[in-house]
Image (cartoon, rainbow, N blue to C red):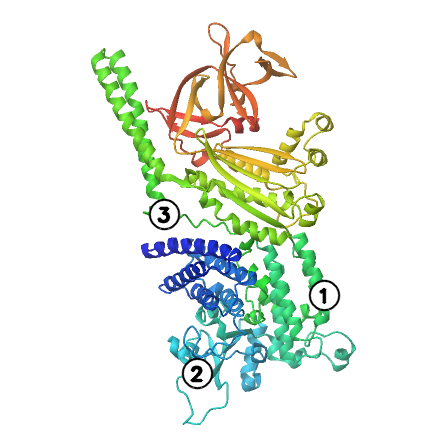
């Protein structure tokens, strides 16, 4: 990737972030002229920047967005909720293209059809007011609309019969054949296009014909600057090759796969009596459509059958189902099958509720069109989706699904924060952190050198000088470390900025009214911590909107305002970042949680009777737990809060949950300010040294062996009038030795906190507390449970850092 492309991607993400925020603000203040002008400038600049590269799909959508914003800015079009939805979806599509470029995708030709749909859905908003030659954004008369349905009626009579027979033989062999209808725009010459050259360069060209789209004018009236031609081409190239060739003009092209039923319609026509006796057969559609139209309908339906066979995995399933239903609905309307639409809508509703394509596929299997062209089903399954399937107008909800349902928070927008002074590549900062880490390791070796100079060589003066120099180097290293840490610090607004859109779309999808309040957006933490917050917070917000805040009617009946309140607050306390997410919803009922946990086998009957309400609420963090009655694309699959806790604990954080039934719920994330430097206590066990993170250590005590008691075959002790369970570190590490005691027969015990509970870990002895640069385990050691990583000590030895949470869970 070139430096200029990297710069474009970075700036484009900043523009998209600003565009999204401006659109959300405009929904609340649609008359803000300054905000509208800023939004227009952002879209215009982003479109201009994309024009520097070979990104026609991106430029096409951004150009349409600019046209719409220009109409709004000039007060010729009112800013509406529908307009905001389509613009947001279009920007999500652009963001998807940026992600592909960042991931090394050289061409976005596969998204050409989608870009046309998004551009058309935007321009539909201004089509009622037809653009003229004087007020068109381009200053040119727009081309006349192409009647796609009539254009798709292929003029096969113009092809010699022998050539059609040759193509039929190729179709029997399963070879790709496409009829291409290329109708250039009237003003294509002004855009630098050469339609004749474009047509002649089509790969695998088998046959071609050029006809006028209207009767020729007299020479005196003929305008040589207008293109009034239609190109009919037949190509033996694959669909992907043709899509790439016409990627700059996809809105001017219709591609229809040529099948045996299309080329030899007589062979597929049913007897007259069978057509009159019942539903449409293989060669016709209901309503007596012509064979050519039947083949086109069969091609569309075959493509949807292929799409329904895809795996029901990923956040885009609902969007795919809506798009399929929209295509089928438009297809059936065009052939007079409106009576099938209510059943189609019912099947779509069932499929969306189940989160699976099966209900829609079962309904489609009952339709005669689903089996009208088996050869087309094979073609569609091989990826050759007919371009005619996209000719129907795109409904707003189907257009919204095209960007992978990003409107419901599906796209992990990592667009980065806009730096006010200087943008620095993260790799450079990480390299500096690695260098300062090596300096810390080298600096920690000086005390060992001083001790060796005094004890081995007896040079006490040299030892004192080394210690004095160590103090100076230590001060400089700490200042450098702090300075680099400040560079890595970022405000949590980088995460918070995505939640207005997320809350807006999910609450609208659920039919709820929610007011979002963000506080403490300037609170800073390490960049890695900020990035680790994204997924857990999305899970929490989705759960709060789906499970916590009630529908308006339920809130009114409970004496609450119809609009729910969701607050996300960030703050710093004692070197940690605190994120509080609270709502005023129905809260968590401990009795319901207990019953669900018992039904799922998470607790037994004895635990059901004695578990406290707070412990019951904490059961929502158990893997596979869910109180949802039905499975949806938002919840009910038992995945969520356990993922939140695991993600937070991976960065040495903790999660606490409190709730009052009927009043609301608050969840607090407590995270370290930085992950770069770790403070650990060095302990000894079985003649080995290990490190334990200090943020997990509550205290260290020495327990007389006589004070240890056995309860249910487990060692315990009483510490400050509370029973403390004890575990031996050698036992947890599968060492076949017992822990040793000191001269007073006392056991060195490390008291740690795991999931809010205290646990005593018996070791052989305690050593010093040191700052280390923790390195993750690599290679075959990467998956070893119980270890957080490793670090180098000042004497050059390797320190293995334990993860007590994993050790206890692993046991």
Q: Residue shown at 47%/50% (left/top)?
A: 413
Whether residue 215 is visible, yes or no, is yes
Residue most toward the top?
744
**Above or below, 172 relative to 700:** below
Residue 374 is left or right of residue 400, and the answer is right
Q: Quadrant of residue 426?
A: top left
Q: Secondary structure at mark 3?
A: loop
Q: Residue shown at 58%/64% (left/top)?
A: 396
Q: Secondary structure at mark 2?
A: loop
> What residue is shown with label 2?
227
Residue 211 is left or right of residue 224, and the answer is right
> What residue is shown with label 1?
342
- Residue 22: percent from the left, percent from the top? 47, 56
Pair 2/3: label in front:
3
> What residue is shown with label 3?
419
Q: Secondary structure at mark 1?
A: helix
Residue most toward the right?
277
- Residue 792: percent from the left, percent from the top? 36, 27
- Residue 197: percent from the left, percent from the top? 40, 78
Q: Residue shown at 42%/92% (left/top)?
A: 221
Whether residue 365 is visible, yes or no, is no
**Above or below, 189 relative to 744:** below
Residue 68 or residue 279, whichever sits in front: 68
Earlier sequence position, callout 3 versus callout 1 = 1
Q: Pointer 3: residues within 10 angstroms few (<14), some, or many (20+)?
A: few
Q: Residue shown at 67%/75% (left/top)?
A: 335
């Amino acid at each position: 990737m070139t430096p200029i492309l990297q710069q474009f991607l970075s700036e484009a993400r900043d523009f998209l972030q600003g565009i999204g925020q401006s659109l959300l603000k405009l929904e609340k203040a649609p008359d803000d002229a300054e905000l509208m002008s800023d939004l227009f400038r952002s879209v215009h600049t982003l479109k201009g920047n994309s024009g520097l590269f070979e990104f026609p799909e991106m430029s096409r959508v951004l150009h349409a967005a600019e046209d719409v914003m220009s109409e709004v800015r000039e007060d010729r079009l009112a800013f509406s909720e529908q307009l905001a939805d389509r613009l947001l979806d279009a920007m999500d599509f652009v963001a998807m293209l940026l992600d592909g470029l960042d991931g090394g995708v050289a061409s976005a030709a596969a998204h050409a059809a989608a870009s046309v749909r998004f551009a058309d859905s935007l321009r539909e908003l201004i089509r009622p007011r037809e653009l003229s030659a004087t007020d068109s954004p381009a200053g040119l008369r727009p081309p006349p609309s192409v009647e796609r349905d009539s254009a798709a009626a292929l003029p096969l009579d113009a092809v010699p019969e022998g050539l059609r027979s040759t193509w039929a033989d190729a179709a029997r062999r399963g070879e790709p054949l496409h009829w291409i209808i290329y109708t250039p725009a009237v003003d294509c010459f002004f855009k630098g296009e050469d339609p004749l050259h474009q047509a002649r360069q089509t790969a695998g060209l088998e046959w071609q014909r050029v006809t006028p789209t209207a009767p020729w004018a007299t020479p005196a009236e003929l305008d040589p600057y207008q293109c009034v031609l239609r190109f009919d081409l037949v190509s033996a190239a694959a669909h992907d090759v043709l899509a790439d060739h016409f990627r700059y003009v996809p809105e001017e092209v219709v591609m229809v796969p040529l099948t045996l039923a299309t080329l030899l319609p007589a062979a597929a026509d049913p007897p007259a009596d069978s057509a009159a006796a019942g539903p449409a057969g293989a060669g016709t559609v209901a309503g007596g459509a012509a064979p050519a139209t039947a083949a086109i309908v069969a091609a569309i339906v075959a493509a949807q059958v292929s799409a329904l066979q895809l795996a029901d995995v990923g956040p885009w399933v609902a969007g795919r189902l809506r798009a399929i239903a929209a295509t089928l609905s438009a297809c059936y309307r065009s052939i007079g099958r409106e009576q099938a639409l209510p059943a189609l809508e019912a099947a779509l509703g069932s499929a969306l509720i189940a989160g699976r394509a099966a209900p829609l596929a079962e309904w489609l299997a009952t339709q005669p069109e689903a089996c009208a062209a088996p050869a087309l089903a094979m073609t569609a399954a091989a990826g050759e989706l007919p371009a005619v399937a996209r000719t129907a107008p795109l409904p707003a909800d189907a257009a919204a699904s095209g960007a992978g349902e990003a409107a419901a928070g599906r796209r992990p927008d990592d667009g980065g924060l806009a730096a006010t002074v200087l943008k620095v590549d993260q790799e450079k900062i990480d390299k500096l952190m690695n260098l300062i880490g090596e300096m810390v390791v080298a600096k920690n070796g000086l005390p060992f050198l001083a001790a060796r100079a005094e004890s081995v060589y007896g040079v006490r003066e040299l030892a004192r000088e080394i210690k004095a120099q160590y103090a100076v180097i230590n001060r400089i290293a700490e200042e450098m470390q702090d300075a680099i840490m400040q560079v890595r610090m970022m405000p949590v607004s980088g995460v918070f900025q995505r939640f207005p859109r997320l809350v807006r779309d999910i609450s609208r999808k659920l039919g709820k009214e929610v007011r979002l309040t963000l506080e403490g957006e300037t609170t800073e933490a390490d960049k890695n911590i900020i990035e680790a917050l994204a997924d857990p917070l999305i899970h929490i917000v989705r759960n709060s909107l789906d499970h916590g805040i009630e529908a308006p009617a339920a809130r009114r009946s409970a004496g609450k305002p119809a609009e729910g309140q969701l607050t996300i607050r960030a703050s710093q306390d004692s070197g940690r970042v605190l994120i509080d997410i609270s709502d005023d919803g129905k809260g968590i009922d401990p009795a319901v949680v207990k019953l669900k946990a018992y039904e799922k086998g998470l607790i037994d009957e004895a635990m059901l009777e004695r578990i406290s309400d707070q412990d019951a609420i904490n059961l929502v963090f158990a893997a596979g737990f869910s109180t949802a009655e039905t499975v949806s694309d938002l919840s009910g699959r038992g995945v969520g809060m356990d993922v939140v806790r695991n993600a937070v604990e991976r960065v040495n954080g903790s999660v606490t949950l409190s709730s009052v039934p009927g009043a609301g719920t608050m969840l607090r994330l407590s995270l370290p300010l930085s992950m770069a430097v770790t403070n650990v206590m060095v302990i000894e066990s079985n003649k080995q040294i290990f490190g334990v993170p200090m943020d997990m250590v509550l205290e260290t005590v020495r327990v007389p062996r006589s004070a240890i008691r056995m309860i249910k075959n487990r060692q315990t002790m009483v510490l400050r009038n509370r029973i403390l369970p004890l575990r031996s570190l050698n036992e947890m590490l599968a060492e076949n030795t017992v822990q040793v005691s000191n001269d007073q027969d006392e056991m060195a015990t490390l008291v740690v906190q795991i999931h809010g509970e205290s646990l005593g870990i018996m070791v052989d002895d305690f050593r010093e507390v040191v700052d280390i640069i923790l390195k993750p385990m690599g290679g075959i050691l990467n998956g070893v449970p119980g270890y957080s990583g490793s670090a180098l000590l000042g004497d050059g030895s390797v320190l293995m850092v334990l993860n007590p949470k994993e050790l206890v869970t692993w046991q």
